Image: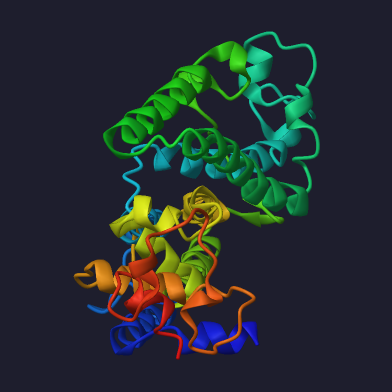
Amino acid sequence: MITRRLLEAPDARGWIFLALLGVAIILVPLLNLVVPTTSLLHLPTSLVPLWGKYLCYALLALSLDLVWGYCGILSLGHGAFFALGGYAMGMYLMRQIGTRGVYADPILPDFMVFLNWKELPFFWWGFNWFPYAVLMVLLVPGVTAFVFGWFAFRSRVTGVYLSIITQALTYALMLGFFRNNFGFGGNNGLTDFKDILGFNVQSVETRAALFALSGIALGIGYLIARAVVCSKAGKVLIAIRDAESRTRSCLRCPRAWRRLPARSMCHKWGSSTRASLRPPTRSNTSSGWQSVAAVPWSAPRSGRCSSITPRRPLPPGCWRPTGCLRSAACSCS
C-alpha cells in the first residue's frame, strides 16, 4: 500500500525527473568505469564525486522546498540538521580508520590524540557499527528538529522571527562544533576517511557506487515528499500556510502539523540539493479551506457541514451553504 501510494504521487514532470535521474545513475558510473580513458565519452573521475555532492545537496533543497514552499516556514537553519546527519556518518568513518591513522591509535581519532584526549567521549560510543550510525543519522537531526519545533510553534513564533531563531540555532551549533573541546574536530572537522563497509572510499568503484546510492536516495526522497504534499496532510500544510489563524479554528493543534515537514527529510543519509517538487499553484482562501476539509477526521463523508467540529464556536452563518466554510465543510459531499 505504501509503495502504491508513493508511485501514484508523481505527476508527468515528476516522472520525467525520475527518468532523467535514473539515466544519470546508470550512465555516470558506466562512462567512468567502462568507457576507456582515451575515448571522448569517458567521464573524468573528478566529476563523479562532484556530481554526487550535487545529488546530496539536492535532497537538502528538496526538504527546504517542502518546509518553505508548502508549509510557509522560512527556515534559515536547515543546514544545521543537514550537518548533524553528516557528522553522524563522519563519526562512523572516523572510527573505521583505526590503526591506519597518523598516530596509530586503535580507538581515538587522530585529532583527539593530537589534543591529548585520554578516552573516547560517550557520544562517540557505538559509531564503529554501521547500523547504529545510520540510526543516529535519522534520530539526532529528527529529535533536534522536533524539540526545536515543539517550543517554537507552541509559542506561535512565525514569520521573520522564526527565521532569525533558526539562523541563530545554526550559528550556535557552528560555534560549538568549531571548538576543539567539543569533540568533533574543531575547525578542521572530520577528515582522512579510509573506507566504508570495508570498501576504500578513494577507489573509483566506491565513488561510482556512492554516486548511484546518492541518486537513489534523492529519488526516494522525492517520492516521499511528493506523496506528502499530495496527501491530505499536505493539503492541511498548505491551508496553514495560507491562513493559519483561520485554520486554527478548525484544527485541534495546527502546530503539530507544522512540525511534520520541519523534521521530515533534511537528515536523510546526512546529505541532500536539486530536485524540483512542483511548487504549489496560487491558492486562495477557498482552496485553503478545501484542503482543511480533506483531513482524515473521524466524521463520515456525509456532506453535512456539522461533521467538522471547530475548536471554538463560529458565527452561525458560517455553517450555511453561503457561509465562509461552505467550500471546506460542505465539499465532502
Residue 23 is left or right of residue 250, and the answer is: left
Residue in the picture at 63% in, 51% down: 138
Q: Is residue 134 visible?
A: yes
Looking at the image, the residue that sits furthest to the left is 282
Task: Give the vertical position of 237 relative to 304 (above or below).
Answer: above
Residue 312 x, y percent position in the rendering: 50, 53
Residue 327 is left or right of residue 263, and the answer is: left
Task: Give the vertical position of 143 relative to 29 (above or below).
Answer: above
Residue in the picture at 48% in, 89% down: 8
Quadrant of residue 90 within the rendered picture: top right
Which quadrant of the rendered structure holds the C terminus?
A: bottom left
Residue 212 x, y percent position in the rendering: 49, 71
Task: Give the vertical position of 98 relative to 231 (above or below).
Answer: above
Residue 129 x, y percent position in the rendering: 79, 47
Q: Nearer the viewer, residue 97 or 129?
A: 129
Q: Nearer the viewer, residue 135 or 330?
A: 330
Task: Give the vertical position of 49 relative to 142 (above or below).
Answer: below
Q: Is residue 224 visible?
A: no
Residue 144 x, y percent position in the rendering: 59, 37
Q: Nearer the viewer, residue 324 or 95?
A: 324
Residue in the picture at 67% in, 47% down: 139
Quadrant of residue 190 within the rendered picture: top right
